[in-house]
Image (cartoon, rainbow, N blue to C red):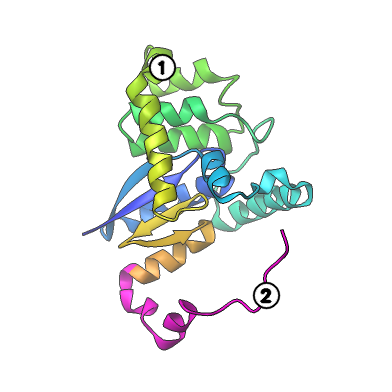
Amino acid sequence: MKRIDWYFDYISPFAYLQSQRLGEFAGIAEIRPVPVLFAGLLNATGTLGPAEIPAKRLWTYRFCQFTAGRLGVAFRMPPAHPFNPLRILRLSIALDGDLAAIDAIFRFIWAEGRDPDAAWPALTAALGVADADALIAAEDVKAALKANTAAAVAAGVYGVPTLAIDGQAFWGVDGTDFALAYLADPGILETGAMKRLETLPAAAERRR
């Protein structure tokens, strides 16, 4: 069975939507959740997140609400966004990447529409985690999040969510079907049309 490295950050509503489709990989591939700091990926690539561009911010929220409806997934924006995801990312690492806990955190934020920072005591209580503050303050937990983010950058990951399979990165919630198709037939990336894309030249570059 193949392994999928699933790079995610709770700050992304797209990551939440994809999290609700991970069950489709059962029996096909093993999911290894890799919490990363999305801001670190943005810094590495010198790009802005969707919520940092006003018009794109509103479009993103509307599109996620629409997409959740199409998927039949509960969706409610938290009280404010973006929020600081550091504590919940570190908590996921402290809990050894437990998928059930990760799903519970995602649903707390994006299905119930709660603030993970303001409602931190309620979240940790719901997870049954005692001394959560001490867990996430551990230096090895902090170092692991930094290492995850650095490894993601080194692997060419530029956004979340990303499903990495066999060195191939399938980015975004709309890449989920592409990843499933690849697992069913890896040859889809070996067709003449696909191979041509690997060496397609740029005819112009934007001035920076």
Taking the view exactly as shown, the residue that stands out farthest to the front is 207
Residue 156 horizontal/vertical position (percent): 44, 56
Say whether residue 101 is visible.
no
| In-image side of 10 versus 2 (left or right) | right
Describe the element under mark 1 as helix, strand or loop: helix
Q: Nearer the viewer, residue 89 or 154?
A: 154
Mark 2 or mark 1: which comes first in sequence?
A: 1
User: Distance from label 2 to label 1 (Cα)?
Assistant: 48 Å
Rendered position, 63 above or below 202 = above
Rendered position, 165 above or below 153 = below
Q: Nearer the viewer, residue 198 or 71?
A: 198
Residue linked to disc 1: 137
* Labels 2, 1: front one: 2
Residue 9 horizontal/vertical position (percent): 49, 40
Q: What residue type is labelled 2?
A: Ala
Image quadrant holding the N terminus, namely bottom left
The residue shown at (36%, 18%) is 138
Say whether residue 18 is visible.
yes
- Badge 1 local density, few (<14 within 10 Å), some, or many (20+)? some
Rendered position, 119 above or below 21 = above
Residue linked to disc 2: 204
Q: In which quarter of the image is residue 63?
A: bottom right
Examine the structure image and report whether residue 192 is included in the region drawn in magenta: yes
The residue shown at (40%, 26%) is 142
| In-image side of 47 versus 186 (left or right) | right
The residue shown at (59%, 58%) is 70
Q: What residue type is labelled 1?
A: Ala
* The magenta segment: 183-208
Taking the view exactly as shown, the residue that stands out farthest to the left is 1
Count of numbered badges drawn on the protein: 2
Rendered position, 208 above or below 87 = below
Residue 144 horizontal/vertical position (percent): 35, 32
